[in-house]
């Protein structure tokens, strides 16, 4: 009771003592009760401001951890209601395209959790705080990724991975978050490093198509950084692993980008033709000023892009 409602209890008891002091017949008792009651009222006001560094009390570590755990449960319940998958599913296939109403619902659930996580920062080194804080950081990142707030999600994943560096799901998710920021070379290098960690830490029995995505997504970072030989090596490995259409189309698109960057016209044309009818034709159109700039004025190549794309998922990691 005192930990949950400490300041309210102190205030009520203090006021009660003050009332008793006023009505008592003994002067010494009156003075004593009045002083004690006043002290308790003052303590009730000051308690939330002075107990932060301590373990107990509504503003102490235990109180903060309890509130953080409660808010995490509320956030998880909301994300489940809206249909947000686990963080690995969001990372491996973009899940951030949602209605404005769903995005607002997710954000309203995540914001109180972020506030609770941030308020615990000063005491996070305490042993009791580690597991609760880590779980909350990961849940916050999941919600942020679900609405496409990649920069903020990357920051919370950074904080989570400081204490949990071997979590391969989180490394994969951090890589995708940094890649989707599209913030230039520094962000792309951060994504590349996270993909390296995810590949290193992956389980031995990881699904081969998921592993293919890892290599294909890392290849996309090498491509952005114009490290084309490394990108091609990753794509060759990914092609050997991939069996699903999504992965094979993604690999083909990245191969087309590299072929175009290296001015290999026949290969660029052939790979582009093989992507007809997919969402990647739209992606090629969007990159005529960079990856496909060498063919931006090639009439035959542009004719290949005239058909409509029937894909419904816009690639976001390329």
Image (tube, rainbow, N blue to C red):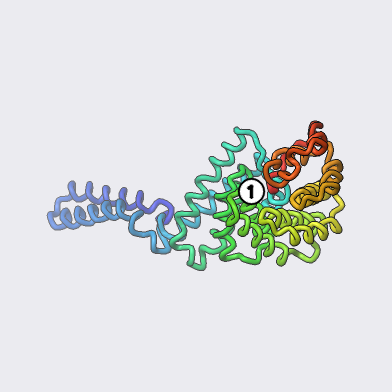
Return the x and y of residue 253 as percentages of the image width and height.
Answer: 78, 47
Whether residue 192 is visible: yes
For image coordinates 66% across by 59% down, the residue present is 192
Position of residue 289 relative to residue 239, above or below, is: above
Seen at 65% across and 66% down, the residue is 166
The image shows residue 20 at horizontal and vertical percentages of 22, 49
Name the residue located 76 percent from the left edge and 64 percent from the top edge: 203
The answer to whether 130 is drawn above or below residue 178 in the figure is below
Give the quadrant of residue 171: bottom right
Q: Position of residue 48 (x, y in %)?
A: 36, 54
Q: Position of residue 149 (x, y in %)?
A: 58, 45
Tell me the SS state at disc 1: helix
The one nearer the camera, 51 or 310, is 310
- Screen quadrant of the N terminus: bottom left
Q: Is residue 85 visible?
A: no
In the picture, measured across the screen, residue 78 lies left or right of residue 20, that is: right
Residue wearing tag 1: 180
């Amino acid at each position: 009771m005192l930990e949950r409602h400490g300041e309210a209890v102190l205030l009520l008891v203090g006021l009660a003592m003050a009332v008793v002091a006023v009505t008592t017949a003994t002067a010494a008792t009156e003075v004593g009760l009045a002083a004690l009651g006043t002290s308790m009222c003052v303590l009730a006001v000051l308690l939330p401001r002075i107990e932060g560094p301590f373990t107990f009390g509504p503003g102490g570590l235990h109180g903060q951890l309890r509130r953080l755990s409660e808010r995490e449960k509320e956030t998880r319940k909301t994300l489940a209601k809206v249909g947000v998958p686990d963080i690995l599913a969001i990372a491996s296939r973009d899940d951030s395209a949602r209605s404005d109403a769903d995005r607002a619902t997710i954000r309203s659930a995540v914001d109180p959790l972020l506030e609770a996580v941030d308020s615990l920062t000063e005491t996070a080194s305490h042993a009791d705080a580690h597991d609760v804080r880590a779980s909350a950081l990961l849940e916050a990142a999941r919600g942020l990724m679900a609405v496409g707030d990649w920069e903020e999600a990357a920051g919370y994943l950074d904080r989570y991975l400081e204490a949990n560096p071997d979590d391969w799901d989180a490394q994969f998710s951090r890589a995708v978050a940094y890649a989707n920021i599209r913030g230039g070379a520094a962000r792309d290098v951060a994504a590349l490093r996270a993909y390296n960690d995810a590949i290193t830490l992956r389980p031995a029995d990881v699904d081969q198509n998921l592993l293919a995505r890892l290599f294909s997504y890392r290849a996309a970072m090498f491509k952005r950084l114009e490290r084309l030989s490394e990108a091609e090596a990753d794509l060759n490995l990914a092609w050997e692993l991939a069996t699903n259409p999504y992965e094979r189309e993604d690999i083909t698109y990245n191969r087309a980008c590299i072929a175009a960057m290296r001015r290999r016209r026949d290969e660029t044309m052939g790979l582009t033709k093989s992507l007809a009818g997919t969402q990647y034709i739209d992606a090629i159109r969007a990159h005529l000023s960079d990856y496909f700039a060498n063919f931006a004025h090639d009439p035959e190549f542009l004719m290949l892009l005239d058909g409509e794309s029937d894909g419904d998922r816009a690639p976001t990691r390329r």
